Image (spheres, helix red, strand yellow):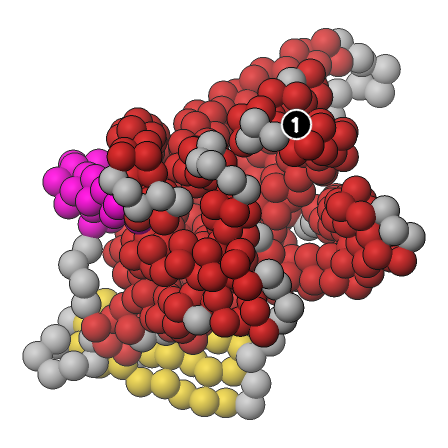
Amino acid sequence: MAAAREGGEAKLPLLPPPAGDHSGDASKDSSWWRLWAREAGRAGYLALPMVVVSFAQYVVQVSSNMMVGHLPGVLPLSAAAMATSLANVTGFSLLIGMAGALETLCGQAYGAKQYHKLGVDTYRAVVTLLVVCIPCSLIWVFMDKILVLIGQDPLISHGAGRYMIWLIPGLFANALIQPVTKFLQTQSLIYPLLLTSLVTMVIHIPLCYAMVFKSGLGYTGAALAISISYWLNVAMLVGYIMFSSSCKETRTRPTIEAFRGVDAFLRLALPSALMICTRVANELGAGNPDGARSAVRVVLSMAAMNAVIVSGALLAARRLVGLAYSNEEEVISFVTAMVPLICITVVTDCIQAVLSGVARGCGWQDLGAYVNLGSFYLLGIPMAILLGFVMDMGARGLWMGLVCGSLSQTTLLSAITFFTDWPKMVRSPLAKLHTKYTVDMMMQLRRPGKGCSARRHRSPGRDVYYWSSGTSRFLVRFCRGGWETSVVPVAFFF
């Protein structure tokens, strides 16, 4: 019996160690720490720059609200804050969530070395998100009337509506930024994202100051500055992809293929939008269940440490948070009182962010959407209404309801991740990805002049595809219960 097989499989000893032999315990402990350090290094290589990227992108909107908050009166900040919240809910978060489908598609395609598919999926996402921006922008145009209709203050509603109109160009820019970010992120090309985000942030701060305080536009100048900054980011990212040698293999030209399979993309994108891990997706695509499992464990421990550090710093500097947004003592005192609840949310968000990334990396968008909808719409929002309005606890009660929903979400996602069968997860995406991509390729090669032939044979419960090109012959079998096998050479089949 061979002690090992070819193809990179693990070598197994012929005889097990004696029952009383514990000499390997110390080496196992050191091996575990080496594994943790190695995986933490990999995760840190991806995560730490992406933390800076996310921070820089977040600063673009937050710094704008901070500057608006120092304009005379409370109306500009109220209008800008309401507009920012509504823009995130009805536009930006929707695009971010839908682009999350690429974490599954691009992550597994890159792990399986299907580079052409990586580019096609990205183009498909760009086209889809640009189309989604059209109805979103129409809603933004009439947002002031919608707010008045549901009983909001007319002055604040009108101001928020004006602010959102100036944000519309930024919405379309974001429809390009999000897919391109996922395209680069799944290839571990993090530093271009880091550099472009930092450059955008550095340019945005003086630009926003000039627009708000020097141009005469007032608070709407902040929205215009955001839109300009987003398009600047788009230009830098697209330029990098077009001219960098790092994207040589994955860079593809726009083709009609990007318009096909939009329905399949939406089946992942829409649940992903309701959900709002590259490492996990790459390991699954490469057929490495142990790597995926290790990535989850290590990143969860890193997230827990991050939660403790961030919440502790926020609690210590709680008065400074209010001062950053306003000079009004009432606002500062209110923010200071709310910070302890925010710290609890930070802890749960750090954990659920990792677990949601695992769900997207594994292609569980549907399941993640059900968890999020149930946690917040069935528990979080009813608790917020009960505590905030029925028990008259105000904004504090509303936030406590949010904490209840976040705790429920984290608990459910933790249970799902704990009971995951990682070897089964590897088999599923690999078979699905390799076989479907090959079948699509074979069917397209039937065009005249390609020297290829392909045909499909239907039988009860399965479809069988036969393909030949010169001396190459392949068989692909698809059972309606799932993908049965990948491409199998059958030299004498015909």
Task: Residue at 20% x, 80% y: name it.
Answer: 446
Looking at the image, can residue 383 be seen?
no
Task: Residue at 60% x, 56% y: name it.
Answer: 275
Nearer to us in this view, 37 or 18 = 37
Quarter of the image containing the N terminus? top right
Choose top left, top right, bottom left or bottom right for residue 344. top right
Residue 58 x/y as whole percent: 45, 37
Q: Examine the structure image and report whether residue 232 is included in the region drawn in magenta.
A: yes
Crowd rating for badge 1 (residues with CA inside 10 Å; few <14, some 14–19, many 20+): few
Can you say whether 405 is above or below 261 in the image? above
Looking at the image, can residue 78 be seen?
yes
Choose top left, top right, bottom left or bottom right for residue 200. top left
Q: Examine the structure image and report whether residue 383 is included in the region drawn in magenta.
A: no
The single residue placed furthest to the right in the displayed view is 391
Residue type at numbered disc 1 = Glu
Main secondary structure along the magenta-highlighted residues:
helix
Can you say whether 169 is above or below 324 in the image? below
Residue 101 x/y as whole percent: 47, 58
Quarter of the image containing the C terminus? bottom left
| Residue extent of the magenta highlight | 227-251
Nearer to us in this view, 50 or 456 = 50
Nearer to us in this view, 187 or 325 = 325
Task: Residue at 48% x, 67% y: name it.
Answer: 143
Horizontal side of residue 251 vs 450, given as left or right: right
Q: Which residue is mark 1?
A: 329
Can you say whether 413 is above or below 101 in the image? above
